[in-house]
Image (cartoon, rainbow, N blue to C red):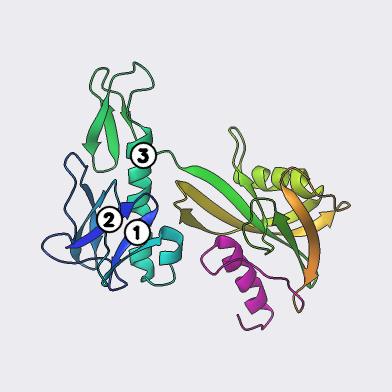
C-alpha cells in the first residue's frame, strides 16, 4: 500500500519516494480522516495529514513542498499527491453546510454531506486559462508581481461566471496587456493543486493593439524572439509546457 502524508504543504517522502508498506511510517493521528484514493501502480493508496512535524526526522524520512516533489517523484505519484492535497484542502475548508450551518461529514471518497439538510457537496475547482501569444518568431512574455523568481511567464487568469474559455482568453489578454488576439486554439490542461485549480492552456496570435501593462498584476511585458528568451518558468507548469512546445515546433531543443 502507498501512503501520502502531508504536514501542511510538506509531503513526507521515504528515501525520496512515497512510503509503501503494510503500515504507514508515522502513526495516523487520532481523529484524522484517512482518505481512500484510486489505486497507484496497482496498489491501494491512502492519505492523511499530521498536525505536527516529526522531531527528529530519521535519515530516510524527509519533507518536501508538493511543487518540489515534481522533480523527484514519478509523474503519476506527483499527480496522486496533488489529488490528496486537494481533498485535504476541501476537508479543511468545508466543515459546515453553507445552507443551514450544520456540520458536514464525508459521504463518498470525494464528497461531503450535511447531516441536517442532506446537501451534498464536492471540491470546488477554480478554472484558469493560460495563453501563449505569438507574433511571427516572437512570443509575448509577462512578469507577474506575484512571481517569486525573476522569470517571465504567460498571460493567465481565472474564468468568470457566464463566459466561455475563449472569451476568458480575450478578456484577460486585453485587461493585462491591452492587446487583441486571434486564432485562439485549445492546447491542453493540467490539475494545479495549489490549492485547487485547473489550468487550461491555449495558443493565440497577436491581432493588434499597443502593448500596455496592467500595473496591478504585471511589472513588465514584451515580445521576445525565440532565440533570445529571458528566464522562463519551471518544467512543471503549463506555461513552460506551452513555451517548450512552441520552441520544439521551430526545431529548438528544450
Query: Does residue 137 appear to the left or right of 12 in the view shown?
Result: right
Q: Is residue 249 magenta?
A: yes
Q: Are marks 2 and 1 in contact (CB under 8 Å)?
A: yes
Residue sitting at x 19%, y 67%: 20
The residue where tag 1 is placed is 11
Q: Is residue 140 magenta?
A: no
Residue sitting at x 20%, y 46%: 34
Q: Residue 188: x percent and y percent?
A: 53, 60
Q: Residues within 10 Å of mark 2 (few under 14, many from 20)?
A: many
Query: Does residue 23 appear to the left or right of 235 in the view shown?
Result: left
How far apart marks 1 and 3 lie (CA) works out to 17 Å
The residue where tag 3 is placed is 90
Q: Residues within 10 Å of mark 1 (few under 14, many from 20)?
A: many
Outermost residue to the right = 210
How far apart marks 2 and 3 lie (CA) works out to 16 Å
Q: Quadrant of residue 136?
A: bottom right
The span shown in magenta is: 228-254
Query: What is the total number of numbered labels drawn onto the structure image?
Result: 3
> Considering the numbered disc 1 on the image, is that residue within a helix, a strand or a loop?
strand
Placement of the N terminus among the 4 image quadrants: bottom left
Establish if 117 lies above or below 89.
Answer: above
Between residues 39 and 97, which one lies in front from this camera angle?
Answer: 97
Residue 5, numbered label: 2
Q: Residue 5: x percent and y percent?
A: 27, 55
Residue sitting at x 65%, y 47%: 166
Amino acid at each position: 500500500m502507498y501512503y501520502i502524508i502531508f504536514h501542511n504543504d510538506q509531503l513526507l517522502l521515504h528515501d525520496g519516494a512515497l512510503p509503501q508498506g503494510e503500515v504507514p511510517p508515522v502513526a495516523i493521528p487520532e481523529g484524522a480522516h484517512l482518505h481512500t484514493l484510486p489505486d497507484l501502480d496497482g496498489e491501494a493508496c491512502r492519505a492523511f495529514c499530521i498536525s505536527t512535524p516529526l522531531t527528529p526526522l530519521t535519515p530516510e524520512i524527509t519533507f518536501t513542498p508538493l511543487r518540489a516533489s515534481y522533480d523527484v517523484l514519478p509523474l503519476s505519484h506527483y499527480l496522486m499527491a496533488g489529488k490528496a492535497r486537494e481533498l485535504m484542502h476541501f476537508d479543511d475548508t468545508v466543515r459546515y453546510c453553507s445552507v443551514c450551518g450544520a456540520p458536514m461529514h464525508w459521504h463518498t471518497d470525494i464528497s461531503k454531506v450535511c447531516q441536517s439538510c442532506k446537501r451534498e457537496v464536492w471540491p470546488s475547482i477554480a478554472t484558469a486559462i493560460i495563453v501563449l501569444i505569438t507574433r511571427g518568431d516572437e512570443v509575448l512574455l509577462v512578469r507577474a508581481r506575484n512571481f517569486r523568481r525573476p522569470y517571465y511567464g504567460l498571460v493567465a487568469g481565472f474564468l468568470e461566471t457566464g463566459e466561455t474559455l475563449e472569451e476568458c482568453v480575450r478578456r484577460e489578454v486585453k485587461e493585462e496587456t491591452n492587446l487583441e488576439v486571434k486564432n485562439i486554439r485549445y492546447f491542453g490542461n493540467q490539475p494545479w493543486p495549489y490549492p485547487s485549480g485547473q489550468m487550461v492552456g491555449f495558443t493565440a496570435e497577436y491581432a493588434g493593439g499597443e502593448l500596455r501593462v496592467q500595473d496591478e498584476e504585471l511589472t513588465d511585458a514584451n515580445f521576445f524572439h525565440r532565440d533570445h528568451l529571458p528566464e522562463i518558468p519551471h518544467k512543471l507548469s503549463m506555461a513552460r509546457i506551452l513555451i517548450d512546445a512552441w520552441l520544439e515546433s521551430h526545431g529548438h531543443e528544450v
